[in-house]
Amino acid sequence: MFNRAAIIGAGLIGGSIGMGLRQRRLARQVAAVARSEETLRLALDLGAADSASRSLAEAVSDADLVVLAAPVSLIVQHLGIIGETIDATCLVTDVGSVKAPIVAAAEKTLPHPGRFIGGHPLAGSERRGIASARPDLFEGATWVFTPGIAAEAEAVSRAQQLAVALGAKPLLLSPQEHDDLAARTSHLPHIVAAALMTVIALRANEGAAILDVIGQGFRDATRIAAGDAALWTDIALANADALLAALGEMNAVLTRFAAALAARDREELERLLLDAQRARETL
Amino acid sequence: MFNRAAIIGAGLIGGSIGMGLRQRRLARQVAAVARSEETLRLALDLGAADSASRSLAEAVSDADLVVLAAPVSLIVQHLGIIGETIDATCLVTDVGSVKAPIVAAAEKTLPHPGRFIGGHPLAGSERRGIASARPDLFEGATWVFTPGIAAEAEAVSRAQQLAVALGAKPLLLSPQEHDDLAARTSHLPHIVAAALMTVIALRANEGAAILDVIGQGFRDATRIAAGDAALWTDIALANADALLAALGEMNAVLTRFAAALAARDREELERLLLDAQRARETL
């Protein structure tokens, strides 16, 4: 499918793509780029790459596939660097959790923006790093692609084929629509889980036995709050407007719950909870 | 350990207690009480009870252990009924998610309130019903007991022994402290998960592809919202004041996140997320 694939950023997602490409023989050669020696060594040891180095330019030269898999703010930087080196026919994609700023940066900085197809595989987790990477990480997952206005149809199709070859289900959305939806399905839940954890931590710091009365429900509800703070700060700031709108919607809904509770309005409270129960059950 | 145990309400928790008592031979006889024929049949078929009927009075007569395992508002009703029938030495406990109103009702209505020890095993789930019951449901779980001012030391000790015999770790709290903490570790997360689900459902109803971009993180964060709405309405109303206070704390924290986002204050946002990350990692 590809001759030489370059994976820029060998973490959970980048490492898993490298492993998948190699195990499924989708690329003759996989070159990984990472900053730490430890990650470079792991990329080779775990079979995520055939070669590993710190040099972006070296990795992307002669590549016909470049996957930008660093945190969101670095992807924008990397787009600026690779533009000078990549072939005109090279397919470029990324795996960032926010798409509009990345697609805009690609259109601005790449010499052939039609070959850039922004992507976001929904396979992240609170775990990170190449040590958690798995070649089957994308099996059954949705992989969103967000072609910009300049995108070539052939590049869109090839990006989708890559996702399918890795076991994922591709989904096309505009960059703005992706960010609007992800603000609610991913970024808002992260902030909410972090806030729940903060409420509990405040009590725990006062010496209450609150950590002893935590059950499985709380663990599930806050699992994502263990995600890397620097990474999520990046994501939240890159999608700040949509996330603020989502926080506003959340606040409006919580206010309705609080009003029903304050009025001891059993009927309204049960209706609100029943709507949520049914919506969750259909997932 | 017990001669005759009566389990009033044979759902997930009551059924699991019955199974545990029988499998571990902690009671010579287990009598289950439920309203539906289907549940009564399942209680016998699944080995949660030796006898099953709709009659509270019949089940509790001659019992030396009564476990009230119906939803919170029914527990208060059942306390009023069993008082006329139970032996003076019978240990009475319950498994309700809110403790202060139940302990108060027991002190008011039971002829021997010193033998009542309110309890709350932290083993609930979004699943319910005896079909999900398991004899090892409490293995490793915390089981809170909330003795009232009248509680006899021997009764407290026996209730704790019951929890240990079922594999749980007993924890003593005052009813008020339990409710104050559970408002934050259980009732608030439930309302928050329901509100998250509501935000997404509103978008889905507008026709957005939002359900297609839901990943594992969102599923985890909202799993508890699938819990039974009637049951949770009961719980929320029984602990309304503490829950409203918790919602106020949540709102204050979310407001700090929103302010940091609106100001594009990277340092503050990362600090907030890092505090939450560290707190979650220590769980």
Image (cartoon, coloured by chain):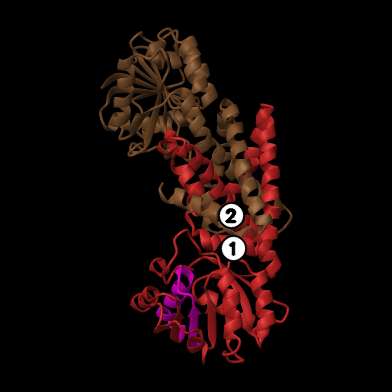
Chain colours: A brown, B red
Q: Is residue A244 above or below residue B218?
A: above
| Helix, strand or loop under label 1 | helix
Q: Is residue B283 visible?
A: no
Query: Where is residue B207 drawn, in percent x and y?
Result: 43, 35
State how many labels appear. Answer: 2
Residue drawn at 66 percent across, 71 percent down:
B101
- Subunit under mark 1: B
Q: Is residue B240 above or below residue A71?
A: below
Q: Amino acid at mark 2?
A: Glu
In the displayed structure, does residue A21 sit left or right of residue A281? Answer: left
Q: Which label sits on residue B235?
A: 1
Query: Where is residue B24 drawn, in percent x and y?
Result: 43, 79
Range drawn in magenta: B1-27
The reply to whether discs 2 and 1 touch (Cβ–Cβ < 8 Å) is no
The reply to whether label 2 and label 1 mark residues of one chain is: no
Query: Which quarter of the picture shows residue B180?
Result: bottom right
Badge 1: residue crowd in 10 Å (few <14, some 14–19, many ≥20): many
Query: Where is residue B2 drawn, in percent x and y?
Result: 50, 87
| Helix, strand or loop under label 2 | helix
Residue of label 2: A268
Q: Amino acid at mark 1?
A: Ile
Q: Is residue A133 visible?
A: yes
Q: Is residue A79 above or below residue A69?
A: above
- Subunit under mark 2: A
Residue drawn at 69 percent across, 55 percent down:
A262
